[in-house]
Image (cartoon, rainbow, N blue to C red):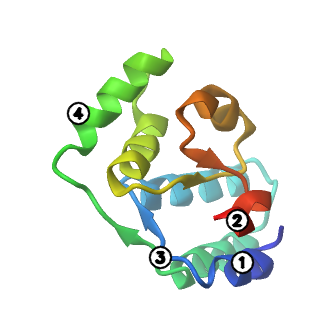
Amino acid sequence: MGSSAARRALAGFDLIGPPLLRSEVTSALHEAVWRRQITEGEADAHREAFTSLAVDIVAPAALYDVAWSIATDLGLAKTYDAEYLALARLSHTRVLTTDARLRRGAARTGLVIDPSELDAR
């Protein structure tokens, strides 16, 4: 799914993310440029597309405690992915991702969906 298709698919949703989301998007795009997988111009377009999604960054008081617990339950060394799962749990929603590793690792939580599941809300 391309950026414009993703924006259209997400248009009817209220989007939220944990505080680290913007840093991770910026870092991933910079890494892709550094690895010469995309051009600087493509990265700029992706950053603009992300900004146009108007994702609300939220950090409930229990975010980091719940992330710690989820990371422990799933056997994760780091809590980065667990922050997304914790926010989903605390917000009674789900994490949308194309990250197959995250889908597999968090499958038993019921908190993760991929873009093909957007209509099944």
Q: Which mark is residue 14?
A: 3
Give the percent coordinates (x, y) of residue 82: 43, 35
Residue carrying label 4: 65
Labels 1 and 2 touching (C-beta < 8 A): yes
Residue at 68% over, 69% down: 43
Is residue 33 toward the left or the right of residue 70 in the image? Answer: right
Secondary structure under tag 1 reads: helix
Above or below 97: residue 38? below
| Dot 4 or dot 2, earlier in sequence | 4
Is residue 30 toward the left or the right of residue 34 in the image? Answer: left
Residue at 72% over, 77% down: 9
Give the percent coordinates (x, y) of residue 18: 37, 55
| Dot 3 or dot 2, earlier in sequence | 3
Q: Which mark is residue 69?
A: none
Mark yes or no: residue 120 visible.
Answer: yes
Q: Amino acid at mark 3?
A: Asp
Residue carrying label 1: 9
Q: Amino acid at mark 4?
A: Asp
- Specify the quadrant that holds the N terminus: bottom right
Secondary structure under tag 4 reads: helix
**CA distance for labels 1 and 2:** 8 Å
Q: Amino acid at mark 2?
A: Leu
Instruction: Give the number of the mark in front: 1 or 2.
Output: 2
Residue at 59% over, 83% down: 12
**CA distance for labels 3 and 4:** 24 Å
**CA distance for labels 3 and 1:** 12 Å
Give the percent coordinates (x, y) of residue 39: 78, 67
**CA distance for labels 4 and 2:** 28 Å
